[in-house]
Amino acid sequence: METIDFIGRKLELDADGHLKNFNDWDKEVAQEFAKLEGINELTERHWIVIEYMRKEFKENGDAPSIRKLTKESGVDTKELYALFPKGPAKKAAKIAGLPKPKGCI
Amino acid sequence: MKKLLILGAGTAGTMMLNKLNNVLDKNEWLITIVDQHEKHYYQPGFLFIPFNIYNCKDVTKPKRDFYPTGTTVINSEIDKIEPKENRVLLKNGQVLGYDYLIIATGAKIKPEETEGLKDKLWYKNIFDFYTIEGACALRDFLKHWEGGKLVINITEMPIKCPVAPLEFAFLSDWFFTEKGIRDKVDIHFVTPLPGAFTKPRASAILGDFLIKKNIRLTTEFNIARVDNDEMKIVSWDETEIPFDLLVTIPTNMGDEAIARSGMGNELNYIPTDPHTLRAKNYENIFVIGDATDLPSSKAGSVAHFQSDILLENFLCVIEGRKPRAKFDGHANCFIESGFGKGILIDFNYDTEPLPGKFPLPGIGPFSLLEETKMNHYGKIMFRWAYWNFLIKGLELPIESNMSMAGKRL
Ligand SMILES: Cc1cc2nc3c(=O)[nH]c(=O)nc-3n(C[C@H](O)[C@H](O)[C@H](O)COP(=O)(O)OP(=O)(O)OC[C@H]3O[C@@H](n4cnc5c(N)ncnc54)[C@H](O)[C@@H]3O)c2cc1C
Protein backbone atom coordinates (compact mmCIF):
# COMPACT_ATOMS: atom_id res chain seq x y z
CA MET A 1 0.00 0.00 0.00
CA GLU A 2 1.35 3.38 -0.98
CA THR A 3 1.18 6.28 1.41
CA ILE A 4 1.94 9.84 0.60
CA ASP A 5 3.14 12.75 2.67
CA PHE A 6 0.92 15.74 2.22
CA ILE A 7 1.32 18.93 4.16
CA GLY A 8 2.56 17.00 7.15
CA ARG A 9 -0.13 14.29 6.92
CA LYS A 10 0.24 10.68 5.93
CA LEU A 11 -2.45 9.58 3.48
CA GLU A 12 -3.12 6.10 2.21
CA LEU A 13 -3.58 5.65 -1.56
CA ASP A 14 -5.13 2.85 -3.56
CA ALA A 15 -3.52 1.01 -6.51
CA ASP A 16 -4.56 3.79 -8.91
CA GLY A 17 -3.01 6.50 -6.77
CA HIS A 18 -6.39 7.74 -5.55
CA LEU A 19 -7.21 8.45 -1.93
CA LYS A 20 -8.07 5.24 -0.13
CA ASN A 21 -10.35 6.61 2.57
CA PHE A 22 -13.18 8.92 1.63
CA ASN A 23 -13.02 10.58 5.05
CA ASP A 24 -9.33 11.51 4.84
CA TRP A 25 -10.33 14.16 2.35
CA ASP A 26 -10.61 17.87 2.93
CA LYS A 27 -10.09 21.01 0.87
CA GLU A 28 -6.37 21.06 1.54
CA VAL A 29 -6.00 17.52 0.28
CA ALA A 30 -7.95 18.48 -2.83
CA GLN A 31 -5.55 21.38 -3.51
CA GLU A 32 -2.56 19.04 -3.26
CA PHE A 33 -4.09 16.43 -5.58
CA ALA A 34 -4.98 19.19 -8.02
CA LYS A 35 -1.35 20.30 -8.12
CA LEU A 36 -0.28 16.72 -8.85
CA GLU A 37 -2.70 16.77 -11.77
CA GLY A 38 -1.26 20.01 -13.09
CA ILE A 39 -4.08 22.26 -11.90
CA ASN A 40 -2.50 25.02 -9.87
CA GLU A 41 -5.57 26.72 -8.56
CA LEU A 42 -9.02 25.37 -7.83
CA THR A 43 -11.60 27.96 -8.81
CA GLU A 44 -15.22 28.24 -7.77
CA ARG A 45 -16.19 26.29 -10.92
CA HIS A 46 -13.83 23.45 -9.97
CA TRP A 47 -15.44 23.30 -6.55
CA ILE A 48 -18.94 22.97 -8.01
CA VAL A 49 -17.79 19.85 -9.82
CA ILE A 50 -15.82 18.46 -6.88
CA GLU A 51 -18.66 18.91 -4.45
CA TYR A 52 -21.17 17.41 -6.84
CA MET A 53 -18.87 14.40 -7.25
CA ARG A 54 -18.60 13.82 -3.53
CA LYS A 55 -22.33 14.10 -3.07
CA GLU A 56 -22.94 11.63 -5.91
CA PHE A 57 -20.43 9.18 -4.50
CA LYS A 58 -21.99 9.32 -1.07
CA GLU A 59 -25.41 8.61 -2.54
CA ASN A 60 -24.50 5.99 -5.14
CA GLY A 61 -21.15 4.52 -4.19
CA ASP A 62 -19.59 5.28 -7.56
CA ALA A 63 -17.97 8.34 -9.10
CA PRO A 64 -20.24 9.77 -11.82
CA SER A 65 -19.43 9.48 -15.53
CA ILE A 66 -18.69 12.52 -17.64
CA ARG A 67 -22.20 12.30 -19.11
CA LYS A 68 -23.78 12.38 -15.72
CA LEU A 69 -21.53 15.28 -14.73
CA THR A 70 -22.63 17.26 -17.78
CA LYS A 71 -26.26 16.50 -17.15
CA GLU A 72 -26.39 17.18 -13.45
CA SER A 73 -23.47 19.27 -12.17
CA GLY A 74 -24.45 22.42 -14.06
CA VAL A 75 -21.07 22.57 -15.83
CA ASP A 76 -21.13 21.64 -19.53
CA THR A 77 -18.76 19.23 -21.28
CA LYS A 78 -16.66 21.92 -22.92
CA GLU A 79 -16.02 23.65 -19.61
CA LEU A 80 -15.35 20.35 -17.83
CA TYR A 81 -12.50 19.67 -20.24
CA ALA A 82 -11.20 23.18 -19.72
CA LEU A 83 -11.29 22.78 -15.94
CA PHE A 84 -9.91 19.25 -15.81
CA PRO A 85 -7.95 18.76 -19.04
CA LYS A 86 -7.86 15.32 -20.75
CA GLY A 87 -10.05 13.26 -18.46
CA PRO A 88 -12.50 15.30 -16.39
CA ALA A 89 -14.29 12.33 -14.83
CA LYS A 90 -11.03 10.70 -13.79
CA LYS A 91 -9.20 13.84 -12.70
CA ALA A 92 -12.10 15.32 -10.80
CA ALA A 93 -12.60 11.99 -9.03
CA LYS A 94 -8.98 11.98 -7.91
CA ILE A 95 -9.14 15.54 -6.64
CA ALA A 96 -12.45 14.84 -4.91
CA GLY A 97 -10.81 11.98 -3.03
CA LEU A 98 -12.81 9.26 -4.78
CA PRO A 99 -11.63 6.02 -6.36
CA LYS A 100 -11.16 5.91 -10.14
CA PRO A 101 -14.59 5.72 -11.82
CA LYS A 102 -15.35 2.05 -12.54
CA GLY A 103 -14.78 2.70 -16.25
CA CYS A 104 -16.27 0.13 -18.49
CA ILE A 105 -14.74 -2.58 -20.58
CA MET B 1 -51.39 -19.17 -15.01
CA LYS B 2 -48.28 -17.18 -14.16
CA LYS B 3 -47.02 -14.76 -16.73
CA LEU B 4 -43.39 -14.39 -17.79
CA LEU B 5 -42.69 -11.58 -20.19
CA ILE B 6 -39.39 -11.20 -22.06
CA LEU B 7 -38.61 -7.86 -23.72
CA GLY B 8 -36.26 -8.05 -26.70
CA ALA B 9 -35.55 -11.12 -28.81
CA GLY B 10 -31.88 -10.55 -29.61
CA THR B 11 -29.02 -12.69 -28.36
CA ALA B 12 -29.91 -12.62 -24.67
CA GLY B 13 -33.72 -12.63 -24.91
CA THR B 14 -33.81 -15.53 -27.34
CA MET B 15 -31.37 -17.51 -25.25
CA MET B 16 -33.39 -16.98 -22.06
CA LEU B 17 -36.62 -17.83 -23.84
CA ASN B 18 -35.25 -21.19 -24.95
CA LYS B 19 -33.71 -22.01 -21.60
CA LEU B 20 -36.81 -21.15 -19.60
CA ASN B 21 -39.12 -22.82 -22.06
CA ASN B 22 -37.26 -26.07 -21.38
CA VAL B 23 -37.72 -25.95 -17.63
CA LEU B 24 -40.95 -24.11 -16.84
CA ASP B 25 -44.14 -26.17 -16.53
CA LYS B 26 -46.38 -25.34 -19.51
CA ASN B 27 -49.49 -25.87 -17.40
CA GLU B 28 -48.41 -23.14 -15.03
CA TRP B 29 -46.56 -20.63 -17.16
CA LEU B 30 -47.44 -18.42 -20.05
CA ILE B 31 -44.31 -17.15 -21.78
CA THR B 32 -44.46 -14.11 -24.04
CA ILE B 33 -41.63 -12.41 -25.92
CA VAL B 34 -41.77 -9.01 -27.64
CA ASP B 35 -39.51 -7.59 -30.34
CA GLN B 36 -39.93 -4.91 -32.97
CA HIS B 37 -37.97 -6.73 -35.69
CA GLU B 38 -38.42 -10.00 -37.53
CA LYS B 39 -34.77 -10.50 -38.46
CA HIS B 40 -32.11 -11.75 -36.10
CA TYR B 41 -28.64 -10.42 -36.86
CA TYR B 42 -25.43 -12.10 -35.83
CA GLN B 43 -23.84 -8.79 -34.83
CA PRO B 44 -20.25 -10.08 -34.43
CA GLY B 45 -20.44 -10.80 -38.17
CA PHE B 46 -20.90 -7.08 -38.97
CA LEU B 47 -17.13 -6.68 -38.48
CA PHE B 48 -16.42 -8.88 -41.49
CA ILE B 49 -18.89 -7.35 -43.96
CA PRO B 50 -16.85 -4.23 -44.91
CA PHE B 51 -13.99 -6.52 -45.92
CA ASN B 52 -16.28 -8.75 -47.97
CA ILE B 53 -15.54 -11.78 -45.80
CA TYR B 54 -19.21 -12.21 -44.86
CA ASN B 55 -22.25 -11.00 -46.78
CA CYS B 56 -25.66 -10.01 -45.42
CA LYS B 57 -27.01 -13.53 -45.76
CA ASP B 58 -24.28 -14.91 -43.52
CA VAL B 59 -25.39 -12.78 -40.59
CA THR B 60 -29.20 -12.80 -40.96
CA LYS B 61 -31.87 -15.33 -40.07
CA PRO B 62 -35.56 -14.98 -39.29
CA LYS B 63 -36.14 -14.65 -35.55
CA ARG B 64 -39.02 -17.12 -35.76
CA ASP B 65 -36.50 -19.93 -36.45
CA PHE B 66 -35.42 -19.62 -32.83
CA TYR B 67 -38.76 -19.38 -31.02
CA PRO B 68 -39.82 -22.65 -29.42
CA THR B 69 -43.34 -23.82 -30.25
CA GLY B 70 -45.96 -22.66 -27.80
CA THR B 71 -44.39 -19.25 -27.12
CA THR B 72 -46.49 -16.18 -27.66
CA VAL B 73 -44.53 -13.84 -29.89
CA ILE B 74 -45.52 -10.23 -30.34
CA ASN B 75 -44.01 -8.16 -33.10
CA SER B 76 -44.25 -4.56 -31.89
CA GLU B 77 -42.17 -1.76 -30.54
CA ILE B 78 -42.22 -1.47 -26.77
CA ASP B 79 -43.47 1.92 -25.67
CA LYS B 80 -42.78 1.72 -21.97
CA ILE B 81 -42.58 -0.41 -18.90
CA GLU B 82 -44.63 0.49 -15.85
CA PRO B 83 -42.79 -1.50 -13.22
CA LYS B 84 -44.98 -0.40 -10.32
CA GLU B 85 -48.05 -1.59 -12.22
CA ASN B 86 -46.34 -4.79 -13.41
CA ARG B 87 -47.25 -4.06 -16.98
CA VAL B 88 -45.77 -3.09 -20.33
CA LEU B 89 -47.34 -0.84 -22.94
CA LEU B 90 -46.67 -1.59 -26.59
CA LYS B 91 -46.73 0.83 -29.51
CA ASN B 92 -49.41 -1.31 -31.18
CA GLY B 93 -51.73 -0.41 -28.30
CA GLN B 94 -51.52 -3.71 -26.44
CA VAL B 95 -51.00 -3.73 -22.68
CA LEU B 96 -49.21 -6.75 -21.24
CA GLY B 97 -49.34 -7.63 -17.57
CA TYR B 98 -46.67 -9.85 -16.03
CA ASP B 99 -45.66 -11.64 -12.87
CA TYR B 100 -42.00 -11.69 -13.86
CA LEU B 101 -40.19 -9.58 -16.41
CA ILE B 102 -36.86 -10.17 -18.15
CA ILE B 103 -35.47 -7.14 -19.95
CA ALA B 104 -33.11 -7.86 -22.86
CA THR B 105 -33.50 -4.79 -25.04
CA GLY B 106 -29.76 -4.45 -25.72
CA ALA B 107 -27.80 -1.36 -26.75
CA LYS B 108 -27.48 0.51 -30.01
CA ILE B 109 -25.44 3.27 -31.59
CA LYS B 110 -26.51 6.90 -31.31
CA PRO B 111 -24.51 8.98 -33.80
CA GLU B 112 -26.90 11.88 -33.10
CA GLU B 113 -25.15 12.33 -29.75
CA THR B 114 -22.07 13.83 -31.41
CA GLU B 115 -22.26 17.14 -33.24
CA GLY B 116 -21.67 16.78 -36.97
CA LEU B 117 -21.39 13.01 -36.97
CA LYS B 118 -24.67 12.20 -38.68
CA ASP B 119 -24.38 15.07 -41.14
CA LYS B 120 -23.58 15.52 -44.80
CA LEU B 121 -20.63 13.08 -44.81
CA TRP B 122 -22.62 10.30 -43.10
CA TYR B 123 -22.41 7.19 -45.26
CA LYS B 124 -20.30 9.19 -47.75
CA ASN B 125 -16.97 9.45 -45.92
CA ILE B 126 -18.15 8.56 -42.43
CA PHE B 127 -19.39 5.07 -41.59
CA ASP B 128 -20.16 2.85 -38.65
CA PHE B 129 -19.92 -0.93 -38.78
CA TYR B 130 -22.15 -1.57 -35.75
CA THR B 131 -25.30 -1.78 -37.89
CA ILE B 132 -26.03 -3.85 -40.97
CA GLU B 133 -26.66 -0.65 -42.93
CA GLY B 134 -23.34 0.89 -41.90
CA ALA B 135 -21.35 -2.28 -42.54
CA CYS B 136 -22.81 -2.68 -46.04
CA ALA B 137 -22.37 1.01 -46.95
CA LEU B 138 -18.75 0.80 -45.81
CA ARG B 139 -18.16 -2.34 -47.89
CA ASP B 140 -19.41 -0.49 -50.99
CA PHE B 141 -17.17 2.47 -50.19
CA LEU B 142 -14.08 0.32 -49.67
CA LYS B 143 -14.55 -1.43 -53.00
CA HIS B 144 -13.42 1.69 -54.82
CA TRP B 145 -11.35 3.54 -52.24
CA GLU B 146 -7.82 4.19 -53.38
CA GLY B 147 -6.35 5.11 -50.04
CA GLY B 148 -5.78 8.08 -47.76
CA LYS B 149 -6.24 8.77 -44.06
CA LEU B 150 -8.35 6.15 -42.34
CA VAL B 151 -9.34 7.22 -38.83
CA ILE B 152 -11.02 4.68 -36.55
CA ASN B 153 -12.58 6.52 -33.62
CA ILE B 154 -14.32 5.35 -30.46
CA THR B 155 -16.61 8.17 -29.32
CA GLU B 156 -17.02 7.18 -25.68
CA MET B 157 -17.08 4.10 -23.50
CA PRO B 158 -18.80 1.77 -22.82
CA ILE B 159 -19.40 0.19 -26.23
CA LYS B 160 -20.57 -3.23 -27.31
CA CYS B 161 -17.75 -5.65 -27.92
CA PRO B 162 -14.97 -3.25 -26.89
CA VAL B 163 -12.38 -5.15 -28.95
CA ALA B 164 -14.28 -4.81 -32.25
CA PRO B 165 -12.68 -1.43 -33.14
CA LEU B 166 -9.20 -2.93 -32.71
CA GLU B 167 -10.23 -5.89 -34.84
CA PHE B 168 -11.39 -3.44 -37.46
CA ALA B 169 -7.93 -1.81 -37.42
CA PHE B 170 -6.14 -5.17 -37.69
CA LEU B 171 -8.38 -6.35 -40.52
CA SER B 172 -7.90 -3.04 -42.36
CA ASP B 173 -4.15 -3.60 -42.28
CA TRP B 174 -4.68 -7.07 -43.80
CA PHE B 175 -7.32 -5.92 -46.31
CA PHE B 176 -5.28 -3.05 -47.75
CA THR B 177 -2.15 -5.22 -47.85
CA GLU B 178 -4.05 -7.83 -49.90
CA LYS B 179 -5.34 -5.08 -52.17
CA GLY B 180 -1.79 -3.86 -52.68
CA ILE B 181 -2.47 -0.33 -51.38
CA ARG B 182 -1.33 -0.62 -47.76
CA ASP B 183 1.39 1.99 -48.41
CA LYS B 184 -1.32 4.44 -49.49
CA VAL B 185 -3.44 4.04 -46.34
CA ASP B 186 -2.54 5.70 -43.07
CA ILE B 187 -4.45 3.76 -40.39
CA HIS B 188 -4.99 5.79 -37.23
CA PHE B 189 -6.69 4.38 -34.15
CA VAL B 190 -8.13 7.17 -31.99
CA THR B 191 -9.55 6.29 -28.58
CA PRO B 192 -10.68 8.05 -25.39
CA LEU B 193 -8.95 5.30 -23.37
CA PRO B 194 -5.44 5.73 -21.98
CA GLY B 195 -4.25 2.77 -24.10
CA ALA B 196 -5.25 0.38 -26.89
CA PHE B 197 -7.61 -1.38 -24.48
CA THR B 198 -8.87 -0.91 -20.94
CA LYS B 199 -7.11 -3.58 -18.93
CA PRO B 200 -3.34 -2.90 -18.46
CA ARG B 201 -1.80 -6.26 -19.53
CA ALA B 202 -4.05 -6.69 -22.57
CA SER B 203 -3.67 -3.02 -23.40
CA ALA B 204 0.14 -3.31 -23.54
CA ILE B 205 0.07 -6.47 -25.65
CA LEU B 206 -2.60 -5.17 -28.05
CA GLY B 207 -0.72 -1.86 -28.25
CA ASP B 208 2.35 -3.80 -29.42
CA PHE B 209 0.27 -5.39 -32.17
CA LEU B 210 -0.73 -1.93 -33.35
CA ILE B 211 2.92 -0.90 -33.59
CA LYS B 212 3.85 -4.15 -35.36
CA LYS B 213 1.11 -3.56 -37.91
CA ASN B 214 2.12 0.05 -38.39
CA ILE B 215 -1.15 1.45 -37.04
CA ARG B 216 -0.94 4.85 -35.38
CA LEU B 217 -2.46 5.19 -31.92
CA THR B 218 -3.83 8.36 -30.32
CA THR B 219 -5.13 7.90 -26.77
CA GLU B 220 -7.24 10.08 -24.46
CA PHE B 221 -8.95 11.72 -27.41
CA ASN B 222 -12.51 12.70 -26.48
CA ILE B 223 -14.38 13.73 -29.60
CA ALA B 224 -16.53 16.84 -29.33
CA ARG B 225 -17.56 17.27 -32.98
CA VAL B 226 -16.93 16.46 -36.60
CA ASP B 227 -15.99 19.27 -38.96
CA ASN B 228 -17.66 18.09 -42.19
CA ASP B 229 -16.18 20.84 -44.38
CA GLU B 230 -12.57 20.37 -43.40
CA MET B 231 -12.99 16.63 -42.80
CA LYS B 232 -11.54 16.41 -39.32
CA ILE B 233 -12.59 15.30 -35.90
CA VAL B 234 -12.12 17.77 -33.07
CA SER B 235 -11.75 16.92 -29.39
CA TRP B 236 -13.16 18.84 -26.40
CA ASP B 237 -9.72 20.36 -25.88
CA GLU B 238 -9.53 21.40 -29.56
CA THR B 239 -7.09 18.80 -30.84
CA GLU B 240 -7.83 18.08 -34.50
CA ILE B 241 -7.36 14.89 -36.49
CA PRO B 242 -7.99 15.00 -40.25
CA PHE B 243 -9.53 12.04 -42.10
CA ASP B 244 -10.43 10.94 -45.60
CA LEU B 245 -12.42 8.03 -44.24
CA LEU B 246 -13.81 8.06 -40.71
CA VAL B 247 -14.95 4.76 -39.25
CA THR B 248 -16.74 5.76 -36.10
CA ILE B 249 -18.02 3.81 -33.16
CA PRO B 250 -20.69 6.26 -32.04
CA THR B 251 -21.98 6.53 -28.48
CA ASN B 252 -23.76 3.32 -27.49
CA MET B 253 -26.97 3.61 -25.49
CA GLY B 254 -29.79 1.48 -24.19
CA ASP B 255 -33.17 1.76 -25.90
CA GLU B 256 -35.34 4.88 -25.54
CA ALA B 257 -38.12 2.69 -24.13
CA ILE B 258 -35.97 2.37 -21.00
CA ALA B 259 -35.70 6.16 -20.74
CA ARG B 260 -39.46 6.52 -21.30
CA SER B 261 -39.99 4.07 -18.44
CA GLY B 262 -37.75 6.12 -16.15
CA MET B 263 -35.70 3.00 -15.45
CA GLY B 264 -32.31 3.85 -16.94
CA ASN B 265 -29.16 5.74 -16.07
CA GLU B 266 -27.76 8.57 -18.20
CA LEU B 267 -27.06 6.08 -21.01
CA ASN B 268 -30.43 4.32 -20.67
CA TYR B 269 -28.81 1.29 -19.03
CA ILE B 270 -30.76 -0.34 -16.24
CA PRO B 271 -29.23 -0.42 -12.74
CA THR B 272 -28.72 -4.15 -12.17
CA ASP B 273 -27.28 -6.16 -9.30
CA PRO B 274 -23.86 -7.18 -10.68
CA HIS B 275 -24.06 -10.67 -9.19
CA THR B 276 -27.70 -11.76 -9.15
CA LEU B 277 -28.74 -9.87 -12.34
CA ARG B 278 -31.92 -8.68 -10.69
CA ALA B 279 -32.99 -5.09 -11.39
CA LYS B 280 -31.80 -3.03 -8.42
CA ASN B 281 -35.16 -1.50 -7.71
CA TYR B 282 -37.60 -4.28 -8.58
CA GLU B 283 -37.83 -7.79 -7.13
CA ASN B 284 -39.65 -9.37 -10.07
CA ILE B 285 -37.50 -7.92 -12.86
CA PHE B 286 -34.27 -9.38 -14.20
CA VAL B 287 -31.98 -7.74 -16.74
CA ILE B 288 -29.56 -9.48 -19.09
CA GLY B 289 -27.12 -8.64 -21.88
CA ASP B 290 -26.26 -5.19 -23.16
CA ALA B 291 -29.26 -3.57 -21.42
CA THR B 292 -27.62 -3.75 -17.96
CA ASP B 293 -25.41 -1.08 -16.39
CA LEU B 294 -22.83 -3.69 -15.32
CA PRO B 295 -19.12 -2.97 -15.73
CA SER B 296 -18.70 -6.24 -17.63
CA SER B 297 -18.18 -6.25 -21.40
CA LYS B 298 -21.25 -5.83 -23.55
CA ALA B 299 -20.80 -9.03 -25.55
CA GLY B 300 -22.71 -12.08 -26.69
CA SER B 301 -20.34 -14.32 -24.75
CA VAL B 302 -21.10 -12.35 -21.59
CA ALA B 303 -24.86 -12.65 -22.19
CA HIS B 304 -24.31 -16.38 -22.57
CA PHE B 305 -22.51 -16.67 -19.22
CA GLN B 306 -25.17 -14.48 -17.61
CA SER B 307 -27.96 -16.67 -18.94
CA ASP B 308 -26.93 -19.67 -16.79
CA ILE B 309 -26.80 -17.47 -13.70
CA LEU B 310 -30.10 -15.80 -14.50
CA LEU B 311 -31.80 -19.16 -15.05
CA GLU B 312 -30.70 -20.44 -11.67
CA ASN B 313 -31.71 -17.25 -9.88
CA PHE B 314 -35.04 -17.05 -11.67
CA LEU B 315 -35.91 -20.56 -10.56
CA CYS B 316 -35.01 -19.62 -6.98
CA VAL B 317 -37.05 -16.45 -6.98
CA ILE B 318 -40.24 -18.01 -8.35
CA GLU B 319 -40.10 -20.49 -5.49
CA GLY B 320 -39.84 -17.63 -3.05
CA ARG B 321 -36.17 -18.18 -2.25
CA LYS B 322 -33.32 -15.68 -2.46
CA PRO B 323 -31.28 -15.61 -5.67
CA ARG B 324 -28.07 -17.54 -5.01
CA ALA B 325 -26.02 -17.76 -8.17
CA LYS B 326 -23.44 -15.06 -8.61
CA PHE B 327 -22.25 -13.65 -11.90
CA ASP B 328 -18.54 -12.79 -11.84
CA GLY B 329 -18.36 -10.61 -14.97
CA HIS B 330 -16.89 -13.41 -17.07
CA ALA B 331 -16.10 -12.38 -20.67
CA ASN B 332 -14.38 -14.28 -23.40
CA CYS B 333 -13.51 -12.60 -26.69
CA PHE B 334 -11.81 -13.75 -29.82
CA ILE B 335 -9.97 -10.86 -31.41
CA GLU B 336 -9.51 -11.23 -35.14
CA SER B 337 -6.03 -9.92 -35.91
CA GLY B 338 -5.80 -10.30 -39.68
CA PHE B 339 -3.89 -12.67 -42.00
CA GLY B 340 -5.89 -15.64 -40.75
CA LYS B 341 -4.88 -15.22 -37.13
CA GLY B 342 -6.58 -14.28 -33.91
CA ILE B 343 -5.98 -13.45 -30.25
CA LEU B 344 -8.15 -14.65 -27.36
CA ILE B 345 -8.85 -12.94 -24.04
CA ASP B 346 -10.71 -14.31 -21.01
CA PHE B 347 -11.42 -12.18 -17.93
CA ASN B 348 -13.95 -11.07 -15.32
CA TYR B 349 -14.78 -8.20 -12.97
CA ASP B 350 -11.65 -8.71 -10.88
CA THR B 351 -9.11 -10.49 -13.05
CA GLU B 352 -7.70 -8.79 -16.10
CA PRO B 353 -6.95 -10.81 -19.26
CA LEU B 354 -3.88 -13.01 -18.65
CA PRO B 355 -1.76 -15.20 -20.93
CA GLY B 356 -2.17 -19.00 -20.92
CA LYS B 357 -4.24 -21.75 -22.56
CA PHE B 358 -8.03 -22.04 -22.91
CA PRO B 359 -10.37 -23.77 -22.14
CA LEU B 360 -8.22 -26.77 -21.17
CA PRO B 361 -5.31 -25.72 -18.91
CA GLY B 362 -1.95 -26.38 -20.60
CA ILE B 363 -3.62 -27.82 -23.70
CA GLY B 364 -5.86 -25.20 -25.23
CA PRO B 365 -6.53 -25.54 -28.13
CA PHE B 366 -6.77 -21.76 -27.83
CA SER B 367 -3.97 -19.49 -26.62
CA LEU B 368 -4.72 -16.48 -24.45
CA LEU B 369 -3.22 -13.13 -25.42
CA GLU B 370 -1.23 -14.69 -28.26
CA GLU B 371 -1.77 -14.48 -31.97
CA THR B 372 -2.47 -17.94 -33.44
CA LYS B 373 -4.26 -19.53 -36.39
CA MET B 374 -6.31 -21.65 -33.97
CA ASN B 375 -7.75 -18.51 -32.32
CA HIS B 376 -8.89 -17.34 -35.75
CA TYR B 377 -10.71 -20.66 -36.28
CA GLY B 378 -12.30 -20.12 -32.88
CA LYS B 379 -13.72 -16.81 -34.09
CA ILE B 380 -14.99 -18.38 -37.30
CA MET B 381 -16.52 -21.28 -35.36
CA PHE B 382 -18.22 -18.84 -33.03
CA ARG B 383 -20.75 -17.94 -35.74
CA TRP B 384 -21.68 -21.59 -36.15
CA ALA B 385 -21.90 -22.06 -32.40
CA TYR B 386 -23.99 -18.88 -32.14
CA TRP B 387 -26.68 -20.02 -34.59
CA ASN B 388 -26.71 -23.67 -33.55
CA PHE B 389 -26.08 -23.62 -29.83
CA LEU B 390 -25.86 -20.25 -28.16
CA ILE B 391 -29.18 -18.61 -28.95
CA LYS B 392 -31.01 -21.93 -28.84
CA GLY B 393 -29.97 -22.06 -25.20
CA LEU B 394 -27.92 -25.24 -25.64
CA GLU B 395 -24.82 -25.82 -23.55
CA LEU B 396 -21.33 -24.85 -24.66
CA PRO B 397 -18.34 -26.54 -23.01
CA ILE B 398 -17.28 -23.39 -21.13
CA GLU B 399 -17.94 -22.55 -17.49
CA SER B 400 -20.12 -19.53 -16.72
CA ASN B 401 -17.74 -18.26 -14.10
CA MET B 402 -14.14 -17.63 -15.04
CA SER B 403 -11.48 -20.19 -14.21
CA MET B 404 -7.89 -19.33 -13.25
CA ALA B 405 -6.70 -22.77 -14.42
CA GLY B 406 -4.35 -22.49 -17.39
CA LYS B 407 -3.63 -18.82 -16.81
CA ARG B 408 -0.18 -17.39 -16.09
CA LEU B 409 0.08 -14.57 -13.58
C1 LIG C 1 -19.76 -5.02 -34.65
C2 LIG C 1 -20.04 -5.87 -33.47
C3 LIG C 1 -19.19 -6.92 -33.18
C4 LIG C 1 -19.42 -7.74 -32.09
N1 LIG C 1 -18.56 -8.78 -31.85
C5 LIG C 1 -18.79 -9.62 -30.82
C6 LIG C 1 -17.95 -10.75 -30.59
O1 LIG C 1 -16.98 -10.98 -31.32
N2 LIG C 1 -18.22 -11.55 -29.55
C7 LIG C 1 -19.28 -11.31 -28.72
O2 LIG C 1 -19.48 -12.09 -27.80
N3 LIG C 1 -20.11 -10.26 -28.91
C8 LIG C 1 -19.89 -9.40 -29.93
N4 LIG C 1 -20.74 -8.33 -30.15
C9 LIG C 1 -21.75 -7.99 -29.14
C10 LIG C 1 -23.02 -8.81 -29.22
O3 LIG C 1 -23.56 -8.82 -30.50
C11 LIG C 1 -24.01 -8.21 -28.23
O4 LIG C 1 -23.41 -8.05 -26.99
C12 LIG C 1 -25.24 -9.09 -28.05
O5 LIG C 1 -25.94 -9.19 -29.24
C13 LIG C 1 -26.14 -8.53 -26.94
O6 LIG C 1 -27.33 -9.20 -26.87
P1 LIG C 1 -28.64 -8.50 -26.30
O7 LIG C 1 -29.69 -9.53 -26.37
O8 LIG C 1 -28.33 -7.86 -25.01
O9 LIG C 1 -28.95 -7.34 -27.33
P2 LIG C 1 -29.42 -7.48 -28.86
O10 LIG C 1 -28.94 -8.78 -29.42
O11 LIG C 1 -28.99 -6.25 -29.54
O12 LIG C 1 -31.01 -7.56 -28.79
C14 LIG C 1 -31.85 -6.52 -28.35
C15 LIG C 1 -33.21 -6.76 -28.96
O13 LIG C 1 -34.16 -5.93 -28.32
C16 LIG C 1 -35.03 -5.39 -29.29
N5 LIG C 1 -35.55 -4.10 -28.79
C17 LIG C 1 -34.86 -3.10 -28.21
N6 LIG C 1 -35.67 -2.09 -27.89
C18 LIG C 1 -36.91 -2.44 -28.29
C19 LIG C 1 -38.18 -1.80 -28.25
N7 LIG C 1 -38.35 -0.57 -27.73
N8 LIG C 1 -39.25 -2.47 -28.74
C20 LIG C 1 -39.11 -3.71 -29.28
N9 LIG C 1 -37.94 -4.35 -29.34
C21 LIG C 1 -36.85 -3.73 -28.86
C22 LIG C 1 -34.16 -5.21 -30.52
O14 LIG C 1 -34.94 -5.17 -31.70
C23 LIG C 1 -33.25 -6.43 -30.45
O15 LIG C 1 -33.77 -7.53 -31.17
C24 LIG C 1 -20.54 -7.50 -31.26
C25 LIG C 1 -21.41 -6.44 -31.56
C26 LIG C 1 -21.18 -5.63 -32.65
C27 LIG C 1 -22.13 -4.52 -32.95
Image (cartoon, rainbow, N blue to C red):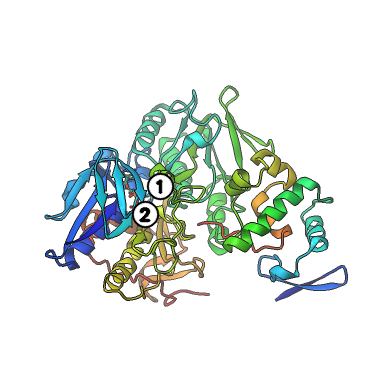
Above or below — where is B312 with respect to B72? below
Q: Is residue B99 left or right of residue B30?
A: right
Q: Look at 46% across and 48% down and name the residue there.
A: B268
Hey, which quadrant is residue B379 in on the image?
Answer: bottom left
Above or below — where is B342 with respect to B188? below
Residue picked out by circle 2:
B83
Q: Nearer the viewer, residue A2 or B143?
A: A2
Looking at numbered disc 1 in the image, what kind of residue is underneath it? Ser
Q: Look at 31% across and 71% down and name the residue there.
A: B317
**Place of residue B50 in the rendered image (x, y in percent of width and height, measured from the top left):** 38, 37
Above or below — where is B3 with respect to B115? below
Q: Is residue B327 left or right of residue B19?
A: right
Residue picked out by circle 1:
B261
Measure the C-alpha gap from mark 2 to mark 1. Answer: 8 Å
Residue B26 seen in the figure = yes
**Does the beta carbon of the residue at mark 1 sit less than 8 Å from ligand 1?**
no
Looking at numbered disc 2 in the image, what kind of residue is underneath it? Pro
Task: Assign a secondary structure to mark 1.
Answer: loop
Residue B62 seen in the figure = no
Q: Nearer the viewer, residue B190 or B64?
A: B64
Q: Which mark is residue B172?
A: none
Above or below — where is B375 with respect to B275? above
Task: Assign a secondary structure to mark 2.
Answer: loop
N-term-proximal mark, 2 vs 1: 2
Check contact, mark 2 vs mark 1: CB within 8 A.
yes
Q: Look at 67% across and 38% down and name the residue there.
A: A78
